[in-house]
Amino acid sequence: MADPRITGAIRYSQDVSLPDMWHACILRSPYPHARIVRVDASALPEDVVALTPEDVEALNRYGCQIQDQTVLAIDRARFAGDPVAAVAAPTRRAAEEALALIDVEYEELPAVFDVDEAAAAGSPLVHEKHHISDNDAAYFGIRPIEGTNVCHRFRIRHGDAGAGFAEADVIVEETYHTAGAQHAPMEPHASLARWQGDRLEVWTGTQTPFNLRMDLAGIFGLPQEQIRVVCPPMGGSFGAKTFVRTEAIAACLARKAGRPVKIVLDRNEEWLTLNRHPATVRVTIGARRDGTLVAKRVECWADTGAYADCGPGVAQKMGYAGVGPYRIPNVAVDSHCVYTNLPPNGAFRGYGAMQSVWASERTMDLLADRLGMDPLELRLKNVLVDGDRFCTGEQMHDVHFTECLRAAADAIAWHEGRRGKGLCVLLKGMQTPSRASIVIERDDGNVYTVRCATAEMGQGARYSIRLMASNLLGVDIEQVRFPDPDTDVIPYDTRTTSSRSTYMMGRALEGAVRDLEMDGRRGCGEVANAGGLDPDTGQGIASTHWHQGAAAAALRVDEETGVVHLERIHASVYAGRVVNRAGGELQNEGSMIMGVGTALLEGIIFDNGQTTNANLSDYCIPAAADLPALTHNLIEKEGAEVHGLGETALPPIPAAIGNALFSLGIHVTDLPMNPEQVLEAIDRR
Amino acid sequence: MTGDTPQWLAPASLREALQLRADHGDDATIVAGGTYLGILMNQGFLAPGTLISLHRVPELRFLMTTGELHLGAMVTHRTVERSPLVQKRWPALARAFSVVASPRVRNQATVGGVLADADYASDPPSMLTALGARVVLRSSTAEREVPVEDFITGYYETDLREDELLVEVRVPGNVERAVYRKFRSRSTEDRPCVAVAAAVTAGRLRVVVGAVTDRPQHFPEVCAVADGMPLTADIAAEIGRRYAELIDPISDSRGSSVYRRRVIAVEVRRALEDLADG
């Protein structure tokens, strides 16, 4: 059967249409922080519907971890791009024309754009209070610091860091900065809402149908069963299409217009909707003269923008990923999620790991240099092995960092010379706790239908689940159907994030097939992983299942201009038992390519809170011709668990490249490593 | 994408196109390949009421030589890049067109369009300036020739009059050697951060630096140090240094002024080394 993505038969979210539907667009604040004095839509023609703050005042606040959002900015706009009004009309053009007739009076307020300034005392406050969400995405202890812009702080206390540093022979400290990045999926955010009486139906590209349903139910004060979320396949997401994005505005407009309303964002609006957290990370590491690590301190400040979204969770993962897969007896981590008057930041492939792995793994090479050690040997000496305890106290099992590192080093002929070469190793957690459930039905004609919430965003999740089901059932994959997830008929699943679906849903599927064999018509399966971390000590179970990988880079530098010429990048990723080889390999390649963008090209530029490169001409993502030789390997183990592969190869790429530069004496601390910055580092050498 | 749908006029002959240009003047926007105009319109920077497309005008699609190279305004970048004639006799020109953006853009973008847009961050204008090329500007009543270096007058500004169309580019055939170096600070598909074109015509060196200020920069008095001299490494470095001193580059997302100044010195020197080698 020809792939519907190739024949064009696929219906993405933005292709869904309903009879009599109208099209909407959004009016956004031009100011990064302003009091909204007045929104006047009286000049609008009668054949359009406008949504203004007074229409949404009575609705409840929402937010997947902190309830800091309203459907439109009601009293204050908190970033340049914050929605303040919206219009629905029979055509998109009519909606745009009407939008221009809305008159908004603003009164500018002091704003803060820098995460370090925002975290400091006396900074303008983006939010006065922090209301912790009842959404199940707020699954851990959220610790806002009232009266500040810090909406969450997470700590790890393992051993005694002070005492550890006191016994260190060598201590290295460095501070790193990473820029914001845009997911840039080919398909922008698109949603369509319709009311049937008191029941709301939403078709939207989302990785999080149940979290979305919870927040929509909360906004409108409805039981969750009164909300139906249908998830057509997405033309890419990478974390961008999570929680509530355009759906609440579409729903409000649909209710007011008394007809279905669809919103498809323009490309530039993607930069105003969700980006990756810019971060400041400071790493201090202490070792004995023989390279044994004795203490590490990691301090992170994740800039979550004007709304928290899942930033607290990102800050937490940034915190423990920054410790790295090492045996260190004394660890202190303080990670902060901080509001600024910039567009909101949230989930992005790698989920906080990239920022702190960049800082942590660059510092490992600084330490190796100070110790006069081979950076590979330093890592191998300290890396976690089976049975070791991580800084969270949890015991590690099925550990393969050594193999990942050796494979990556071999790929760039590390032992033949280290100049222009760099390595990086990482661990990345999977959503813990979480739950996955799945139903499989058999009809009279021996066709099986999978009902589950796993979202297809181009990663091939539906194919992998169909493939696993067909193998378990002993039938051809064409006999297994996987319709668009629809919360009216699918069982609960935490969400399609953190590379968990093939592993978690795959195990739930095994139970469902066993159940089907008993029942004949219908089988259900469910798995859950339990755990979580104490937010004040960081002790507990960070992840029941670790993503493990390493990367290597080989490059040369034009030392007169600072241009980096990548010769090869390689990723070695632990895969356990492979389900869909081609799919897994493509995930690795896609992750590595995004990693190259993060390392060398991508950074959102702000000028006094205004996004200045919100288009794909001024914001460069990697083109095919930018890519070096790109190789990778899946480290497999017969009979092992299946391992998610969606993200692991992204976070280590920037540090591998940064360390390859450092092997030439070029020490860069900030991402992206553009030629100008590299040249400045050459000047400092 | 706001406002009314623009009126779309697609004349089928040059005569008709010139008449429409005379009738509408600058109230209508000329469409050639549309690669740049499309971005401006999509981003809402431009909302023309009337568009005059030249895509059906057959007289603007020629590529021929009479000793000089004649390029019709609607010849695409890809056509110039792949023309055996241009590759053989004006290889640096073929190269300058071949490094623009991506094949998808080059299949669409035109010789006339890139000059009339006068975007500072473009490849062909610097090369055409170094080669001493001229544009032919025609109205329904008159025709004139203007050197490319005089045609581009500032950021997105040209000498094109309200009743004229850019119909042709003429490139002299007596070029002895030429090189084009595109320096990119970001993606390979990006516009140049610094563009350097150098050519020797009738024994005279012309070095042109583009993408760093409002229009291609050319300093004959600096190039004159190479007159009658072999192009040594010292002379190459000296010309690079002088260009870097004389140009006051802009800062944009491709690089700061300070950075560009350093790159100008390096890339001009390298261009001259390439020229000496080649």
Image: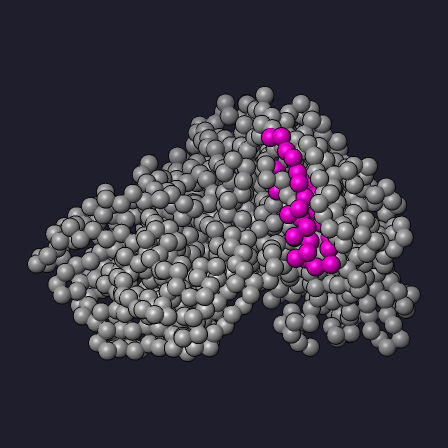
Q: Position of residue A10 (x, y in %)?
A: 69, 68
Q: Is residue A404 visible?
A: no
Q: Residue at the spot x=56%, y=65% of the render?
A: B7
Q: Residue at the spot x=76%, y=70% of the render?
A: A470
Q: Looking at the figure, which quarter contains the N terminus of chain A? A: bottom right
Q: Which residues are magenta?
A: A79-108
On the rendered structure, is A418 left or right of A91? left
The residue most toward the top is: A122
Q: Position of residue B43 (x, y in %)?
A: 54, 53
**Magenta stretch contains residue A95:** yes
The residue most toward the left is: B228
**A261 or A427: nearer the viewer:** A261
Q: Looking at the figure, which quarter contains the C terminus of chain A? A: top left
Q: Position of residue A234 (x, y in %)?
A: 67, 59
On the rendered structure, is A434 left or right of B238? right
On the rendered structure, is B187 left or right of B169? right
Q: Residue at the spot x=35%, y=77% of the render?
A: B62
**Magenta stretch contains residue A240:** no
Q: Position of residue A37 (x, y in %)?
A: 68, 32
Q: Residue at the spot x=47%, y=74% of the render?
A: B11
